[in-house]
């Protein structure tokens, strides 16, 4: 594996007397799409929030040559583009302006008057998320799936080296699920380090280079999909089996009843 760009050592998040995640360690390179999977409540969202610096954590997070804890909020927002679960926007802002919020960490604070470099990044993100025909519509008038693509475009507009996406395909139709996974893979191929939380094991098997498996706040497996989605791991993590096949050279994995 190439040099690590994002490393966690003994990462933990404790709330009250409870460890939401504990002793999580990994090294991930740029240019890699990593799926984060695990049962409900396993700590996937908490892990992403800890990496983004949105929840207090212990242990160490290193980004490139920096200790993440030493970064200012703006530096952290430039390095980590974070797509939260749900991503509600309640103001009737035009789609273009919502996407432009992704340029805020770059100092572009007025969506109506973006410097050229920022306007170009916004245009790239709008095109990548296939939002060209919706760019001038108020975001509040879009469907759930369309809003999800706007939220993703905002994150892509940051053009950060690390993308943290929490269930970005949860509300999308099958076509856009495939498009968004392909888009995230292309983002990784373009040099970003992409972490995607998903419950779709089939898409994780097909698109991810690596898989992190969380259970009860612990990292129980980390590796290529062939190892991290093995029958043993799925039985241990989810108490399920899976139908496995290959199509067009890609792995097919369909969750099935426990063996
Ligand atoms: N603010 C909070 N206060 C107390 N407990 C919390 C808080 N946020 C999350 N938790 C608990 O932490 C655990 C991990 O939650 P988290 O949202 O990280 O899980 P997840 O793996 O993303 O789950 P899901 O697949 O259901 O989205 C859960 O048991 C949850 O109840």
Image: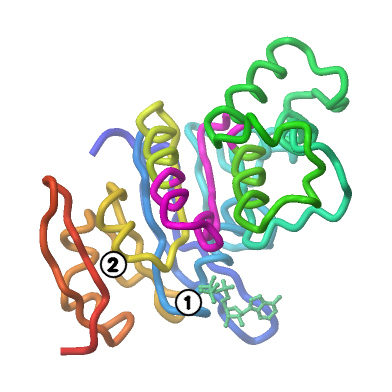
Q: Is 109 or 21 nearer to us in this picture?
A: 109
Q: As drawn, is 229 to the left or to the right of 92?
A: left
Checking the image for residue 221, the label placed there is 2
Q: Which residues are magenta?
A: 156-180
Query: Which residue appears farthest toward the front when viewing the image?
Result: 133
Q: Residues within 10 Å of mark 1 (few under 14, many from 20)?
A: many
Q: Is residue 105 above or below residue 41?
A: above
Label 1 beta carbon within 8 A of ligand 1: yes
**Quadrant including the N terminus:** top left
Q: Residues within 10 Å of mark 2 (few under 14, many from 20)?
A: some
Checking the image for residue 42, the label placed there is 1
Let me know if residue 170 is in the magenta part. Answer: yes
Let me know if residue 105 is in the magenta part. Answer: no
Q: Is residue 131 above or below residue 174?
A: above
Image quadrant, ligand 1: bottom right
Residue located 43% across and 38% down the image = 183
**Quadrant including the C terminus:** bottom left
Quadrant position of residue 117: top right
- Identify the mark nearer the N-term, 2 or 1: 1
Q: Is 195 or 89 nearer to us in this picture?
A: 89
x then y, percent, for residue 188: 39, 35
Secondary structure found at label 2: strand
Q: Is 88 or 95 nearer to us in this picture?
A: 95
Residue located 17% across and 78% down the image = 232
């Amino acid at each position: 594996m190439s040099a690590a760009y994002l490393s966690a050592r003994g990462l933990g998040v404790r709330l009250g007397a409870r460890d939401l995640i504990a002793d999580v360690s990994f090294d991930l390179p740029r240019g890699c799409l990593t799926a984060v999977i695990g049962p409900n409540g396993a700590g996937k969202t908490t892990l992403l929030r800890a990496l983004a610096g949105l929840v207090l954590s212990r242990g160490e997070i290193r980004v490139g040559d920096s200790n993440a804890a030493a970064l200012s909020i703006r530096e952290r927002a430039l390095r980590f583009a974070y797509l939260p679960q749900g991503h509600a926007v309640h103001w009737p802002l035009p789609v273009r302006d919502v996407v432009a919020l992704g340029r805020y960490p770059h100092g572009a604070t007025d969506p109506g008057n973006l410097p050229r470099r920022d306007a170009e990044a916004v245009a790239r993100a709008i095109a990548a998320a296939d939002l060209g025909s919706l760019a001038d519509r108020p975001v509040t008038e879009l469907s759930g799936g369309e809003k999800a693509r706007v939220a993703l475009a905002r994150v892509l507009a940051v053009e950060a080296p690390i993308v943290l996406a929490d269930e970005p395909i949860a509300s999308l139709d099958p076509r856009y699920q495939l498009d968004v996974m392909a888009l995230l893979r292309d983002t990784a191929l373009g040099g970003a380090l992409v972490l995607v939380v998903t419950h779709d094991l089939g898409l994780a098997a097909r698109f991810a280079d690596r898989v992190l498996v969380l259970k009860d706040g612990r990292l129980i497996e980390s590796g290529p999909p062939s190892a991290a989605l093995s029958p043993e791991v799925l039985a241990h993590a989810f108490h399920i089996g899976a139908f496995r096949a290959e199509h067009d050279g890609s792995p097919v994995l369909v969750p099935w009843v426990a063996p």
